[in-house]
Amino acid sequence: MSTRRHLPILRDTAPVSAPVAPTDDTAAEPPPWHWIPLGTTVSLVGFGLLAQGAATLSVRLLGRIYPLGATAAQVAYIRAAHPATARSVELTAALIPLFTLLLAVAVGAYVVGRRGDGTNVRHGMLSGGLTVLVFWAVTGRLWSLLALVPVAMWVGYLGAKWGVARRLRALALDA
């Protein structure tokens, strides 16, 4: 039987310094850019909670003009008989989930601006854009969803601006 061989151990000749213990200021708060995915997470969870209600509201709205389980021929007949009403109901039913998504983006950006020390409106704006890009990736790259990115960034900007203003007002009251 052969003799047992061991891997060599490399020894570092440089002196080992003691690890620096983090202070309370550095350990408590993550860097500001960490709030971008955190705001996106808040937006995704918020939309997940609101989406079922938005879908129910859209279906009920469509149910006012189209019968339940309508065939393509029935839908075509109703559209031909009442074109303006049918189109306005369809447009309204399509805008409800869109506004729900933008509301979720605004809430996520508000959280970024309000709770993140060192964050600014740019972080909320990027959080809003990232939220829509995540939805774009999840929906199988629905290209029409990319048109919503600038709108979501603008809504994220406004939400973060409101959050930052509230944070600064709270800090001014504490001082």
Image: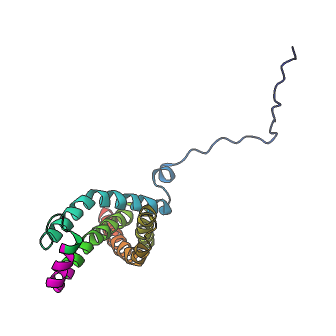
Image quadrant in which you'd find residue 41? bottom left
Nearer to us in this view, 21 or 82: 82
Q: Farthest residue to the bottom: give it.
A: 84
Q: Is residue 116 visible?
A: no
Relative to 46, is 162 above or below? below
- Which residue is at 15% across, 82% downward? 85
Nearer to us in this view, 60 or 163: 60
Q: Is residue 89 visible?
A: yes
Percent of width and height locating residue 166: 31, 68
Q: Looking at the rendering, in which quadrant would you find the N terminus?
A: top right
Q: Looking at the rendering, in which quadrant would you find the C terminus?
A: bottom left
Percent of width and height locating residue 116: 41, 61
Image quadrant in which you'd find residue 44? bottom left
Q: Farthest residue to the front: give it.
A: 73
Q: Is residue 12 left or right of residue 52?
A: right
Give the prevailing secondary structure in the magenta stretch.
helix
Q: Is residue 63 left or right of residue 109?
A: left
Percent of width and height locating residue 84: 17, 86
Segment colored magenta: 74-87
Image quadrant in which you'd find residue 128? bottom left
Nearer to us in this view, 96 or 172: 96
Task: Indicate yes or no whether the magenta region holds residue 81.
Answer: yes
- Which residue is at 21% across, 78% downward? 76
